[in-house]
């Protein structure tokens, strides 16, 4: 993965040619998917994204498939 900067976060790997709006949207998606999500297997546990659509419950250790970016979005 390319290096990031403190000010522009994950979109620091892109140049200025992508535009400000695209980089802001990328940052919002990137921060949400890397955040711990609510696990469907344990009510107080969190799930960590391992790859696109592959999640791991931190409490039970179960690995399961689900949505690519957010687990919470499936309930809404």
Image (cartoon, grey):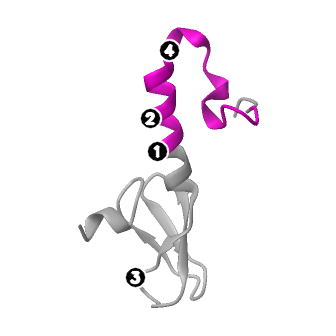
User: Which of disc 4 and disc 2 is earlier in sequence?
Assistant: 4
| Residue at image mark 1 | 29
Of the image marks 1 and 4, the number of the one nearer the N terminus: 4
Left or right of residue 2: residue 75: left
Q: Earlier in the sequence, mark 3 or mark 4?
A: 4
In the image, residue 51 lies in the stretch drawn in magenta = no
Q: Which residues are magenta?
A: 5-28
Mark 3 vs mark 2, foreground winner is 2
Quarter of the figure that contains the C terminus: bottom left
Query: Could you say whether the residue bearing mark 3 is in a helix, strand or loop?
Result: loop
Name the one closer to the observer, 64 or 41. Answer: 41
Real-space Cα separation, disc 3 to disc 4, in angstroms:
37 Å
From the image, tell me which residue sits under label 2.
25
Task: Provide the residue designation for mark 3.
Answer: 40
Q: Say left or right for 72 vs 9.
A: left
In front of the other: 26 or 1: 26
Kind of element beneath mark 1? helix
Tag 2 near tag 1, CB within 8 Å: yes
Would you name the residue on which mark 4 appears? 18
């Amino acid at each position: 993965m390319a290096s990031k900067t403190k000010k522009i976060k994950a979109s620091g790997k892109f140049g200025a040619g992508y535009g400000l709006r695209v980089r802001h949207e990328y940052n919002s998606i990137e921060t949400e998917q890397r955040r711990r999500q609510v696990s469907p297997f344990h009510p107080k546990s969190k799930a960590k994204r391992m790859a696109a659509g592959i999640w791991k419950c931190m409490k039970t250790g179960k690995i399961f498939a689900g949505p690519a970016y957010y687990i919470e979005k499936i309930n809404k």
